[in-house]
Amino acid sequence: MAKKSVATLQTGSKRLTKAIKMVRSPKTGAYTFVERIMDPDNVNEWLKKH
C-alpha cells in the first residue's frame, strides 16, 4: 500500500515539486517515507518507479 503527497514549490523563476511517497518495507512491514524535490513533469514517472 502506498500513498502520495505532492506540494508545489516556487523558488525564483524555477518551479519545483516536492513528492512524498509512503512505502511499506517487504522485510519488516514498517512504513517509510521517500521524499524528493524535482521538476513537476517527472513526478508521475518517479511515483510509478518506487
Image (cartoon, rainbow, N blue to C red):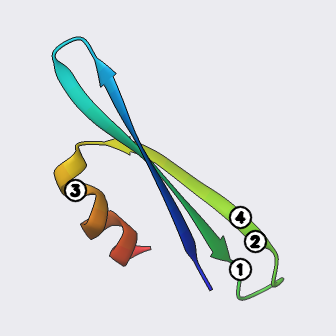
What residue occupies the far top of the structure in this picture?
Answer: 12
Instruction: Tell me if label 1 and label 4 are in contact, CB under 8 Å.
Output: yes
Amino acid type at mark 3: Asn
Instruction: Tell me if label 2 and label 4 are in contact, CB under 8 Å.
Output: yes
User: Under tag 1, what secondary structure?
Assistant: loop
Q: How far apart are marks 2 and 4 (CA)?
A: 4 Å
User: Under tag 3, what secondary structure?
Assistant: helix
Q: Which of 21 and 26 is in front in this view?
A: 21
Q: Which residue is the site of mark 3?
A: 42
Q: Which residue is the site of mark 2?
A: 31
Amino acid type at mark 4: Thr
Mark closer to the observer (2, 1) = 2
Give coordinates of residue 39: x percent, y percent: 23, 43
Q: Which residue is the site of mark 4?
A: 32
Residue 25 tag number: 1
Instruction: Tell me if label 2 and label 1 are in contact, CB under 8 Å.
Output: yes
Is 44 situated above or below 42? below
Relative placement, left or right, of 47 versus 34 is left
Is 12 situated above or below 21? above
Of pointers 3 and 4, the one earlier in the residue sequence? 4
Residue at point 71%, 64% (across, down) = 32
Q: How far apart are marks 3 and 4 (CA)?
A: 21 Å
Amino acid type at mark 1: Ser
Give coordinates of residue 37: x percent, y percent: 39, 40
Is 32 situated above or below 49? above
* Disc 2 packing (10 Å; few <14; some 14–19; many ≥20): some
Residue at point 16%, 15% (across, down) = 13
Of pointers 1 and 3, the one earlier in the residue sequence? 1
